[in-house]
Amino acid sequence: MDIALIGGHGKIALLAEPLLAQAGHTVHAVIRNPDQTAEVEATGAKAVVADIESLDAAGWDELLRGKDAVVWSAGAGGGNPQRTWAVDHDAAVASMDAAARVGADRYVMVSYFGASLDHGVPESEPFHAYAEAKARADAHLQDSQLDWTVLGPSGLTLEEPSGRIDLAATEGSTVSRGNVARVIAGVLERPATAGKFLTFNDGEQEVGAALDAAR
């Protein structure tokens, strides 16, 4: 599979890239800063330098043309509501629309456990812009004709990955970024996970088994 991984220098992305490369996929890791090229390519991915905030439709089409799948693992990191909306909503939606136009039909979105249009975060809270942007981007993806999977990991940690998760959790706890990377790799190997919003914590079930049993 030829995969475009948007946000290729993120902490989760840097853990997912070697897993995908080792599985035999070609990974084009999209980054904004060319200084990150060597670190990204050390994972086995191919670095592609592009500013996703400024790409127009033609630029997105060029970036995603020929790809089999898109993994969105980018984020503005909060703080600036305008930039948060530009990245987490506008750029994300533009990537989805381009994926549909050029036939990159498999799309995996890294979201978060509580993402929902009914997120309940007050406008007065700094987290509101992120919650709103992610929820609306997720909704756009779910309304598309793409073979989408939305991942809703709970609180992210830098713990060593256990390779085991809990997909049945109803409340957020924590999950290692390494386990999120394993879930990304796992859903790309499993077409049956398309059309699912998978929320998960660290848990006791091996990632592959958990995904095989996902309903």
Image (cartoon, helix red, strand yellow):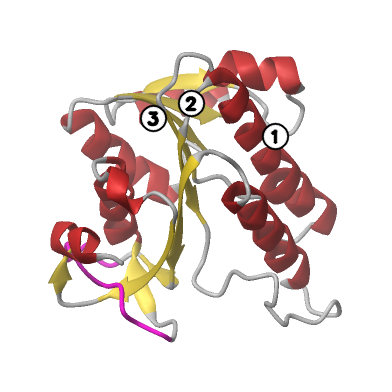
Between the residue at mark 1 and the residue at mark 3, the CA separation in whole angstroms equals: 24 Å
- Label 1 or label 3, whichever lies nearer to me, is 1
Taking the image as shown, residue 119 lies to the left or right of residue 13, namely right
- Provide the residue span drawn in magenta: 159-170
| Residue kind at label 3, given as amino acid type | Val
Going from N to C along the chain, the mark reached first, 2 or 1, is 1
Taking the image as shown, residue 79 lies to the left or right of residue 134, namely right
User: Residue drawn at (79%, 79%), measured in percent from left and top?
Assistant: 125
Image quarter in which the C terminus is found? bottom left
Quick check: is 161 in the magenta stretch? yes
User: Residue drawn at (35%, 82%), measured in percent from left and top?
Assistant: 169
- Label 2 or label 1, whichever lies nearer to me, is 2
* Number of the label disc, if any, that sits on residue 94: 1
* Number of the label disc, if any, that sits on residue 28: none
Please give the residue where the numbered disc 2 appears in the rendered image: 104
- Establish if 96 lies above or below 4: below
Going from N to C along the chain, the mark reached first, 2 or 3, is 3
